[in-house]
Amino acid sequence: MPDTPADSARNQHGPAPQRPESNHDDALPPDWIDGEGPSKGLRQTTLLSKDARLAGRPKLCSDCGLCDSQLKPLMAKTCVFVRNRGDELEQRYLGRNRRDGDELRFGVFTQMLAARMRRPVDGAQWSGMVTTLAARLLEGGEVEAVITAATMPGTRFAPRPVLARTPEEVFATAGNKPCLSPNLALLDQVRESGVKRLAFVGTGCQVHMLRAAQQELGLERLDVIGIPCSDNVTYPDLTFFLDQVSRSPATIVHYEFMQDYSLHMRHEDGSEERLNFIDFPMDKLEGIFPSACLSCFDYANTLADITIGYMGAELGWQWVLVRNARGRELLDLIRPELEIGELGSGGDRARGMPRYLQMLPKPPGKPPKPIRRLIAWLQRNRGPRGLEFARAIIEMKLFRNLHYVRTHFARYEPRIVPDHVYRTLAPYADDYQAVFERPLDPTRRSRD
Ligand SMILES: Cc1cc2nc3c(=O)[nH]c(=O)nc-3n(C[C@H](O)[C@H](O)[C@H](O)COP(=O)(O)OP(=O)(O)OC[C@H]3O[C@@H](n4cnc5c(N)ncnc54)[C@H](O)[C@@H]3O)c2cc1C
Ligand code: SF4
Ligand code: SF4
């Protein structure tokens, strides 16, 4: 969910409800290490409340699905919330680590562009580049199956991971299901069905676990199509969120946090509703975000072969980051169907960041209406735009999540906060020190 430096008031999240179970590192319960098989079936996907669904899991768990599969014994080696292995996985799958500059925020990339499908896909979140790419891979026989997220029957937005075998099955999964989705649980089905050439569509945490387990999967080919992701929620919390922000939550068929600093919601009858980010009732939303998503440092899905989002592009376009040679081949596959646009950048994110930092430790608040109107106007007309918008959003989430980890999971910081976070935020180190009275980058962090 995007926000901006000027919109500091909505960026506070109190502690997410904690579950009374063991810690997530040296005190892992034995069954997490020994692995006694899947803990539940896919039919339960995100329909339970978060407490019921995640009961017995480590405190930091984004429900990626790995622990629902026979690969559960690999959790301690692969889970990004046990140890972030981004640096080593970048080396292995992208050939190098990120360089200073935009790669610190966006991850390693060899090409970055704005694009969109000339003929948008029905039901797609944006123009449908993701589903088209996955479908073309199946059509050309380059992969035998695609792990993707369909909609749980009887719900509007609850995800149901599926192993799609035909282009039609892939296109049927177009559109966001903006909830935690245990996609990796399908790795059992992949193995059982003998699939050796696989494409995977998913979020950054899922991709971290997948990459960390990749060498154990026995696949001949794995294409990874990443979507950016931030502030995901469980399905019950999503419905709660929509209840708070919409005049008619039950009729919403599509929504997105747009680059114009507002939430756009489309209803069944085609009407559109908008709510400025600054008008969100943050006091009511406190606690809906899972601890894992508040401890996540990979907004841009940096271990994918190609990441396809929107937030670095102008409204109406998709934002594409090609990360390696395979990503380039994937883009080439749909290039004839694409319109290519320009990436722009405007505004100055650094101006608002000190104020954002000052607001970070304070409880969420909502300024009076005239002030909110002014802020919304300033955001839209003077705020960061294009790539600068993406930089601003990513830096704010890094700060917010670092603060969250230091407040609630301080012991885990050396394991789960990657070095690039400190490098990215270094220009604001003095502002950080002034607000938090401690260094941004602890120079003597333990790495064991
Ligand atoms: C929770 C969430 C938050 C996001 N936040 C941002 C953001 O802040 N900035 C940004 O640039 N982009 C974000 N995205 C990605 C963006 O909204 C689009 O999904 C992406 O740009 C692809 O658009 P498309 O039209 O090409 O996708 P489509 O062709 O419509 O395909 C969408 C694909 O997304 C997959 N998918 C849907 N829901 C999930 C899920 N819950 N977990 C895993 N995979 C799923 C489906 O498998 C499907 O293949 C987010 C996506 C999600 C699910
Ligand atoms: S995030 Fe995935 S790998 Fe980590 S504990 Fe949860 S299900 Fe297991
Ligand atoms: S915000 Fe991070 S941890 Fe949460 S679902 Fe998205 S990628 Fe995973």
Image (spheres, rainbow, N blue to C red):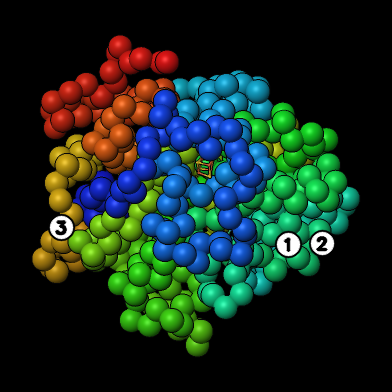
For label 3, the SS is loop
The tag on residue 53 is none
The one of 273 and 413 positioned closer to us in this rendering? 413
Q: Position of residue 99 (x, y in %)?
A: 50, 22
Q: Which residue is rendered at x = 34% and y = 48% of the image?
A: 19
Q: Determine which residue is flagged by label 1.
A: 170
Q: Determine which residue is flagged by label 2.
A: 166
Q: Mark 2 belongs to which amino acid? A: Thr
Q: Determine which residue is flagged by label 3.
A: 365
Question: Is tag 3's residue or tag 1's residue first in the polypeptide sequence?
Answer: 1
The answer to whether mark 2 and mark 1 are in CB contact below 8 A is: yes
Q: Mark 3 belongs to which amino acid? A: Gly
Disc 1 Cβ-to-ligand 1 distance below 8 Å? yes
Q: Classify the position of the N terminus by image quarter.
A: bottom left
- Left or right: where does residue 230 sit relative to residue 166? left
Using the numbered discs, state the Cα–Cα distance from disc 3 to disc 1 in whole angstroms.
Answer: 42 Å
